Image (spheres, grey):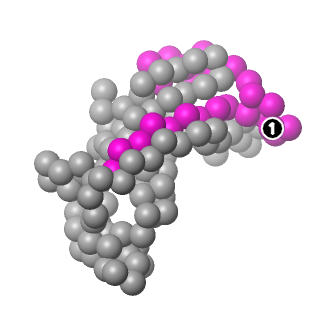
């Protein structure tokens, strides 16, 4: 399953050259992941408040392929590649129409309040697979 999240590029997303500032792609894919998880019925705030667990980014591979500009409509496409014991790997692309602008592989780890990796609970694992 590929989740799609649409967004518009605002002036604040661009740099002096008028193109999307490179770090903002990381913000865009974060929004895409958050919306996907929400649509899967995973309440991250409840998970933190009740269980003391949060997903944190462990590793990002990022490839910048083409530029986006002010007022472009972009789509963040998110696909779950692998669900491990404590680890979740997602492939995320940012596209404009048929053009892929940015491609990434993001590895997340579920951690406790003490920062220790913990197994993903069965109910969450089921929603992710």
Horizontal side of 118 relative to 42 (left or right) equals: right
Residue 57 against residue 124 in the figure, above or below: below
The total number of labels drawn is 1
Q: Residue at x 31, y 60 (%)?
A: 7
- Camera-side residue: 49 or 85? 85
Q: Position of residue 14 (x, y in %)?
A: 38, 76
Viewport quadrant of the N terminus: top left
Q: Where is residue 128 in the image (x, y as percent from the top left)?
A: 47, 24
Mark 1 crowdedness (10 Å alpha carbons): few <14, some 14-19, many ≥20: few
Residue 1 belongs to the span the image colors magenta: no
Residue 44 against residue 123 in the figure, above or below: below
Q: Residue at x 36, y 69 (%)?
A: 20
Q: Residue at x 35, y 44 (%)?
A: 103
- Camera-side residue: 55 or 92? 92
Residue interval drawn in magenta: 102-129
Horizontal side of 1 relative to 105 (left or right) equals: left
Viewport quadrant of the C terminus: top left
Determine whether the residue tagged by mark 1 lies in a helix, strand or loop.
loop
Inspect this view and state whether residue 2 appears: yes
Location of residue 44 by image quarter? top right
Q: Position of residue 73 (x, y in %)?
A: 22, 63
| Residue with the mark numbered 1 | 115
Q: Residue at x 32, y 73 (%)?
A: 19
Residue 25 against residue 126 in the figure, above or below: below
- Camera-side residue: 73 or 49? 73
Horizontal side of 101 relative to 92 (left or right) equals: left
Q: Position of residue 118 (x, y in %)?
A: 74, 24
Task: Single out the residue that lies furthest toward the bottom.
Answer: 16
Inspect this view and state whether residue 51 appears: no
């Amino acid at each position: 399953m590929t989740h799609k999240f649409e967004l518009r590029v605002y002036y604040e997303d661009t740099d002096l050259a008028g193109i999307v500032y490179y770090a903002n792609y990381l913000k865009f894919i974060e929004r895409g992941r958050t919306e996907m998880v929400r649509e899967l019925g995973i309440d991250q705030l409840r998970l933190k408040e009740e269980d003391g667990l949060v997903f944190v980014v462990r590793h990002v591979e990022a490839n910048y392929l083409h530029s986006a500009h002010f007022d472009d409509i972009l789509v963040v496409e998110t696909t779950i590649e692998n669900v491990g014991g404590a680890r979740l790997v997602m492939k995320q692309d940012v596209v404009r129409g048929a053009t892929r602008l940015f491609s990434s592989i993001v590895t997340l780890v579920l951690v406790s309040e003490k920062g220790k990796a913990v197994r993903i609970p069965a109910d969450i694992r089921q929603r992710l697979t």
